[in-house]
Amino acid sequence: MLTKITGGTIFDPANGIDGEVRDLFIRDDHVIETPPDDVKIDTTIDAKGKTIMAGAIDLHTHIGGGKVNVARTMMTDDHRQRVDHRTDLKRAGSGIATPSTTSAGYRYGEMGYTACFEPAVLPNNARQAHMEMADTPMVDTGGYALLGNDDFLLRMMAEDAEQSLINDYVAWTLTATQCIGIKVVNPGGINAFKFNTRKLDVDEPNPHYGVTARDIVRVLSRALSELGVPHPLHIHCSNLGIPGNYESTLQTIAAAESHPIHLTHVQFHSYGTDGPYSFSSEAARIAEAINSNRGVTTDVGQIMFGQTVTCSGDTMLQYRHRHHASPRKWTCMDIECDAGCGVVPFRYRNKQFVNALQWAIGLETFLMIEDPWRVFLTTDHPNGAPFTSYPHLIKLLMDKSFRNDQLANIHNGAAEMSHLSAIDREYSLYEIATMTRAAPARILGLSDRGHLNSDAVADIVIYDTLDDKEQMFTKPWRVFKNGEVIVEDGEIVAKSKGKTQTIRPQYDQRIEQKLKEYFDKYQTIRFGNFAIKDDEMAENIGSEITTHPCTCERLV
Amino acid sequence: MPELSDIACPFCGLLCDDLEVSANGNELALSNNACAMSRRGFKEYDREFGPAKAIVNRDAKGSDEAIKHAADILANATSPLILVANTDVAGARSSVRLAEQCGGVIDHINSPALMRNVSVLQNSGWFTGTFAEVRNRSEIIVIVGDEIFDRYPRLIERVLLPERSLLESNLDKRKFAFIGPWNEKSLPKSLRAKKPIIIDTELSRAADVISLLRVMLSTGSINQFDIDLTLKEKLHNLFDYIKNSSYSSVIWAAGDFDFPHSDLLVQNLVEWVRSLNDKSRAIALPVGGTNGDLTLNQVCTWQSGLPIRTSFARGYPEHDLLLFDYRRLLKSGEADVLLIFGHSDLNIDITNELDCIMVGPKDIDTEKQIFIQTGLPGLHHSGHMFRGDGVVSIPLRQIQRTNLPSPAQVLDQISRHLDLK
C-alpha cells in the first residue's frame, strides 16, 4: 500500500524543515523517500494548505499504574462529567482528569498524539502499569521505573557500593520492569518519610541510610550516562511545591555533576519566598540555569484553572500538601520498600494568588527557556491539568494577545508579580513541532519517530491551518498511526493498538545473585517472579515490546 | 527434585509464590510450605483434563453449541448481570468487556466485603501500605477482625512475623494487638508467644474501641468515659505502644466485618491511622484479593474509570454502590440473565425465572440452563492476579497440561458471537 500526501506544509524540525510544501510518501507503516515516477500510488491525499507534523509524543503523563486507579476511584464526579459511549469502534469509558484507559487513548488519538510515557512506574507495580497502558488504545506507550527511594539502592549506597554495581542494578531494573527510562522522585525523601522525616533538603542525609539527594542524583545520572541509556535521569526534585524550592532545583542541577538530567514538572520547583504571601516566581533563575546547562532538559507541568487531581510518587510532599485537597479527601501509600504514592484532588483557581502565580510561572518557564529542544509541553497530567488542555496551552504560547487577555483574568497581585506581560515571545509552529515531536523522540532515544524521514514510523498528523491554534490542535484533520488513518476531523475512524517501547542496557548478571538474596530475606514476591518476561508482555499483559538501541546522540 | 519452583498459589489473596510443584502421576505434589487451603484447592482441580464439559438445559452438548446458546441468551437479555466468582486479569478483562457489550452490570461475589473498603476510599481517601512494608517496618501490628488467619493461612510467616526484616530492631521489638472476639487460646501460637494486647469485643462494637483510641490521640485522655477499668488499662497500654512506635500497621480483612454499616468501622480505622501520622508513621492494610476480587476491581476501574458494581445499560459506565449490588439485583428480580464466571457451582439464591449461564473450572452436573467448563488460571493456564494488598500482581503459571479452555477464552468466544449479532 503506497500513499501520497500531497501539497501539505511540513514542519519537521528533526530535518530542519520549517513550513515547506512537500509531498510525503507512506508505504505500509513507514515513511519512504519519493518513489520513482513509474511506481503506482494507491491513494493520494490532497493536503493543500494544511499543516503536517509527525505524531505528537507526550513524555510525561500519568496514564497507568496503581496511583492512577486510586485517583480514578476517588474522583467519582470526574467520571460523570464525561463519558464515552460504546460504539463499533470504541470501548465505553469515562473521566477527564482521571480518564479510563480507553478514554485516555481516544482523547490522545483525537489530538494527534501517537506515543505516551508513564513517568512513575514502581518496579513492584510495573505489571499493572503495563497492563493499563496495554488497555490504552491508539498510542504506543512506555514507562520510567522509579529508583532512588528503594531500600535496595539506598542500602547499597550506604555500604559504599561501587558505581559499576549501581549501573548493573539500574540496567537490571530497566530490563525487569520493561521500562525505557529511570525516574527519581524526591530523591531519598519518600524513603525518609517512612522513617518519619517530613522534609528533606538536597544535602540532608536520609535518617537511616545516611545518603543525600545529592548522592542519589549523582550516582543515578552517572549510571544512565555510563550505560548509554538515551533518556537521562528523569528527576522530580526535592521539596515540590514548597516556597523557596528553587534552591533545591539549582542544587539538583549541580548534583548531577554535568551528567545529563531531565527536570520534570519544573514549574512546581521554581518557587521563591518574596512578596506579601511569601510566594514568588523564580522561573527566570531556573530558566537561566537551564539555558546555561546544555545537559539539562525539562518539561514544565503547566497548571490550568479548574478541577483536577494530583497523583505522585512523592508521599512525603503529598502528605504535606493534603490540607489543600479539594474536594477534601486524600490518599497516601507506602509501597513495597520501593517508594510510595499520594493522591490529592486539586481545584486550581484563577483568583487565588498562589494558583494564579503557578499558572504564570509555568508560562514564564516556557517562554524564558530559549531552546525548544530542551523544554517539553506537559501539564504533568493530571497534576497540573488534564492533558486535554494541551491545545489551549499551545495557544497561550503562540498567541501573545490571547495570553495577555488570560493574564488580565487572574488574581491581580499574582499578575503584578509575574514577568509574563513583559514577555513578547510567541512560539512558532516549528518550535511547537520541536517540543512535542522531534525533541521528545530524541531525548527518549526513539530514532524511528518524531520526524518524517524515510524509515520513520508513519505516525503523521495533518491539521487544518487555522489562526486559532487551540482549535487547530484540538481537532486534527487526519491522524495516521503506523500508516493507517485512525482519526478524521478529530473523530476516531479506526481501531489501533500500540506497543511498549523499551530499552535493554547490558549488565553483569552477578547483580541478580545479590538481588535474589535480598528478595529471599525481605521481599514478599519471589525474585524469580519479579522480572516481566518478553512473552509475558505480549501474551498476558497484552502489549508487544519494541526495543530501542542503547546508544544515542548525546545532547552534551 | 521439584519440576517447578516459585509457583504462585491462586487460592487466597496472599498469592504465595514460593511453592515447589512436581507431578506425582496425575496428582500434583506440593512442597511443605503449601498451606492446607492451597493443598485442598489444587487437589480439587488437578484431575480436570478436559475436554471441556458443556451442558444446555441439562443435556450434555459441545462447548461451541453451549457458547452460542449463551450468546443468544445474552443478546436477548434486557438486564444481564455478570457476576464474577473467581478471576485472573485476563478473565477480568473479558468479563468487563462482555458486561459492556451486553449492557449488563459487573459485580463480584466478594463485593459486599470489598465495598466496605472501596466506599471509604471514594469518600475520604486513606493511608495504606503493602505486605513488604508491614513485614519490614512495623513495630506494632494491630489486627481488627476475627477470621483473618483462616482467610489468609500464611499471613503470619509471610507478613506479620517473618524470620528476617530490613529493620531487624523493629522486628525484635514487634508487638501485636488484637481487637475483636479473641482470647489467648484462640490466637495462633506464634503470636500468643509475643504476649499481645487483646481487646476482646464484638466486631460490631469495634468502632467504639477505635473511637476511644482516637479520643486518646486527640485529647490524651478517656477519663470522661464510664468504661470498664480493664478495658481502659488495655487501651492505655495499646495507646502507649503506638505512641512510642516508629511505625504502626493496622490490618483487617473486610470480610470479617459482616454487620450493617460496617463501612463506618473501616472509616474509623482509616481516620485513626491518618491521625497517627500527625506525629509518627502508621499505615492501614486492608487485606483482600481472594477469588480475584481486587483483580476484577482494578481492571474494571482502569477500563471503565469506575469500580465494580458498574452498569453499562446506557452504553457507558455508571457506578452505584447500592443500585448495582448483585444481591439487590437478584433479590428484586431486576436481573433477567445471570452469568456466573469462574466458579462451577456457586450457591446463591436465584429465582427460577432467571436464565443462568455458568462458566467455571469444575466438571459438574447442574440444573442451570448453561454450563461451560473451563480450566483454572494458575493451574491449567498462565495469567496474573492482584495480591491482597491491591498493589502487586503476581504471575500465575500453567503447571498442568489440559484441554480445557481458559475462562477468558470462553467469554471471548461468547463476545465474538455477540459481535456478529
Image (cartoon, rainbow, N blue to C red):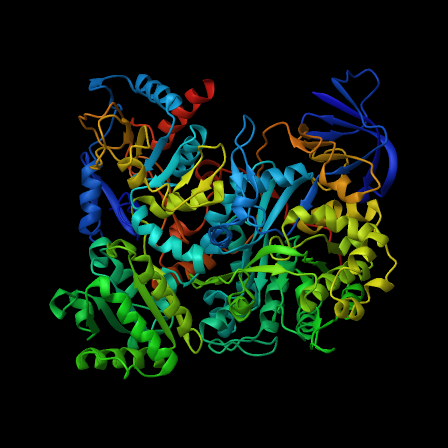
Q: In the displayed structure, would residue A34 be above or below residue A166? A: above
Q: Position of residue A351 (x, y in %)?
A: 70, 64
Q: Position of residue B21 (x, y in %)?
A: 25, 44
In this rendering, position of residue A59 left or right of residue B141: right
Give the residue displayed 60% in from the left and 59% down from the top: A347
In this rendering, position of residue B127 left or right of residue B26: right
- Image quadrant containing the C terminus of chain B: top left
- Please, which residue is most extreme toward the left here? B185
The quarter holding residue B299 reads top left
**Along the line of sight, which residue is nearer the eye, A348 or A182?**
A348
Q: Does any portion of residue B245 appear in the rendered image?
A: no
Q: In the displayed structure, would residue B336 be above or below residue B37? A: above
In this rendering, position of residue B128 left or right of residue A48: left
Q: In the displayed structure, would residue A373 be above or below residue B349? A: below
Q: Position of residue A547 (x, y in %)?
A: 59, 42
Numbered label tally: 0
Q: Position of residue B200 (x, y in %)?
A: 18, 69
Q: In the displayed structure, would residue B289 be above or below residue A10? A: below
The quarter holding residue A406 reads bottom right
In this rendering, position of residue A481 left or right of residue A507: right
Give the residue displayed 82% in from the left and 20% down from the top: A36
Q: Does any portion of residue A241 appear in the rendered image?
A: yes
**Along the line of sight, which residue is nearer the eye, B257 or B412?**
B257
Give the residue displayed 54% in from the left and 78% down from the top: A205
